[in-house]
Amino acid sequence: MSLGFNVEDIQDIKIPPVKILLFIYGKEEVRYTDLTKLIASRGTLSANLKELEKEELIKRRAVTTKPIQTYYSLTEKGHKIAKAFNEVKERIAEFKK
């Protein structure tokens, strides 16, 4: 079972929060700039990140360097949900073969 996805692996998923969770899954942390490659609209991305953080599915860590760097990782709750999404994604891939 593979952990995490590259941008190309999840382009067919249309629900931004699911895309974000799957992208972070299996990675320790991802930078905000990595996520902009996944979701082009910064407004959509920011709104979804705020919602995922509010739901305690992701954690945000800001490094006060210049420029400021922001990192995101899954919480324990977020990891469990992302794992379930990953399993569904793999099952769908099996049916497409």
Image (tube, helix red, strand yellow):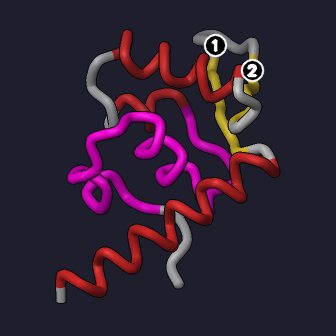
* Left-right relation of 44 to 73: left
Q: Mark 1 touching mark 2, by CB under 8 A?
A: yes
Q: Position of residue 68 (x, y in %)?
A: 63, 13
The crowd level at tag 1 (other Cα within 10 Å; few <14, some 14-19, many 20+) is few
Disc number placed over residue 41 in the picture, else none: none
Which residue corresponds to mark 2? 63
Residue 25 is inside the magenta segment: yes
Type of the residue with mark 1? Ile
Amino acid on which disc 2 is placed = Val
The quadrant where residue 10 appears:
bottom left
89 relative position to 10: left or right:
right
The numbered mark at residue 68 is: 1
Q: Name the quadrant containing residue 41.
A: top left
Relative height, residue 43 to residue 40 (above, below): above
| Residue at image location 63% in from the left, 21% down from the top | 69
- Identify the residue at horizontal 32%, vertical 36% (top origin): 37
List x then y, in percent, for residue 43: 37, 10
Which residue range is magenta in the image? 5-31
Q: Residue drawn at (56%, 24%), measured in percent from left and top?
A: 49
Q: Please give left or right for residue 25 compared with residue 53 in the image.
A: left
- Which quarter of the image is occupied by the C terminus? bottom left
Q: Name the residue located 45 percent from the left edge and 69 percent from the top edge.
A: 88
